[in-house]
Amino acid sequence: MDKMTRLLDEVELPSDIRGFSIEQLNQLAAEIREEVISVVSEVGGHFASTLGAVELTLALHYVFNTPEDRIVWDTGHQAYAHKLICGRRDRLATIRQLNGLSGFLSREESEYDVFGAGHAGTSISAALGMVEAKALEGSNRKVVAVISDGCLSAGLTYEGLNSAGHLDRDLIVVLNDNEHFIDPRVGAVSSFLSKQFTTDLGVRLQKNLSNLLRNLPSGENLKHAARKLRDSFLGLVTPGFLFESLGFQYVGPIDGHNLSEMITTLENVKKIEGPTLVHVMTKKGKGYAPAEEEPIKFHAVTPFHVLTGKAKKEKGPIPTYTEVFGQSLVRIASQNPKVVGITAAMGSGTGIDRLAREIPERTYDVGIAEQHAVTFAGGMATEGFIPVVAIYSTFLQRGYDEILHDVCLQNLHVVFALDRGGRRTRTNCNIC
């Protein structure tokens, strides 16, 4: 595509896209993908998540009057497209470089980055705080929290959902479901979330049941029975029952790459009172074949050749810390049946995945739940096992209380392997 005629070059701020047609928005989405691929292939960075969230990003900024309306992203690795259309197009090539753009969201960087994000699971609580402030001020602004399916393994997500359902405020949660953490998602919630409508008949049945419930004559017993029937149906064919039980109105699932459908849905959701969750299905790595085929490998990348997807700098003969750790853990665990490995959705990043391949029955990925990982390890240690907990150093900050209270004060034998400890310790680090 001729860069001189790109729509992207006409976009400085989200207000510039609000007059675009659906056809133009689709063209813009293709150009954003092209730009992200071009930049990240040269400088590295988070990759597959942003490619999957391009249409979602455009739909949100098209429908909502940002920055007056607030969009709170859960972690920033899916927000490169957001940066592109929010005043930073000319600086995207500096991302994660010295004095360049942050790899995540940064309040100091843009008024469109309303909440800084580096840890998963924060957006609903932060957005709910903004909603409550809005209510106290008497403001009419809208607040949207964008979470990923991976964040549904984080305890903080449920604390936020529980509180939002209790307060019954006008919070919109968009669940960006691409079926992956950094590694494949795990846990009971992921299995539940995978239930989706598979036929038009299922969608029609749900609508008909809801209409029937609204139109029933007076009579609590009759309405109670009808409501139980509807809820049973929802629990059978859709993950909506989980969220409706927490006080949210569930909408979806919808195609996260269909701009027309998403814009129509979000316009309707804007009018709903009370907490609402919109379930959006996306494909991680969308638009770049190697990333679609191997989304985990392309979650975060070093510079690579666009045509082949291969790294520009071949791996040297010296093994990384992560590789040495993974090999050593397998060797030790092979010799000692009491050694187990535990990680929090970071198996490939920490090297625990090697143990998972060799001794899967003694390997545990608990999802994005660092506190649980530590206390879970403490429980195993009380029974004579030796848990090795491998988590990135900044992510383990969430488990400080559990390290002290549930391990150290009880003098339990738990080994902590803090990967990325050398460059992930600054509070405002732009490098990940």
Image: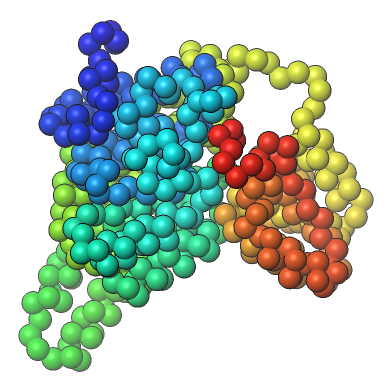
- Give 412 or 329, whichever is nearer the viewer: 412
Q: Residue sitting at 37 percent across and 19 percent down?
A: 90
Mark yes or no: residue 219 visible.
yes
Give the side of residue 420 with respect to residue 58, left or right.
Answer: right
Residue 62, x across and y down, in percent: 21, 39
Give the side of residue 363 with respect to residue 170, left or right.
Answer: right
Using the rendered view, name the quadrant where residue 126 is placed. Answer: bottom left
Above or below, comparing residue 129 to residue 60 in the picture:
below
Residue 346, x across and y down, in percent: 63, 46
Above or below, comparing residue 101 to residue 359 in the picture:
above
Q: Residue sitting at 69 percent across and 56 percent down?
A: 364
Q: Please identify the residue farthest to the right as the structure is shown.
A: 335
Q: Residue sitting at 42 percent across and 61 percent down?
A: 125
Using the rendered view, name the quadrant where residue 33 is placed. Answer: top left
Residue 343, x across and y down, in percent: 68, 52
- Give 244 or 143, whichever is nearer the viewer: 143
- Give 26 or 353, whichever is nearer the viewer: 26
Give the side of residue 147 with respect to residue 336, left or right.
Answer: left
Using the rendered view, name the quadrant where residue 169 is placed. Answer: bottom left
Looking at the image, what colour scheme do you see? rainbow
Quadrant (top left/top right/bottom left/bottom right) for the C terminus: top right
- Give 341 or 102, whichever is nearer the viewer: 102
Quadrant (top left/top right/bottom left/bottom right) for the N terminus: top left
Mark yes or no: residue 233 visible.
no
Residue 102, x across and y down, in percent: 50, 33
Q: How many marks?
A: 0
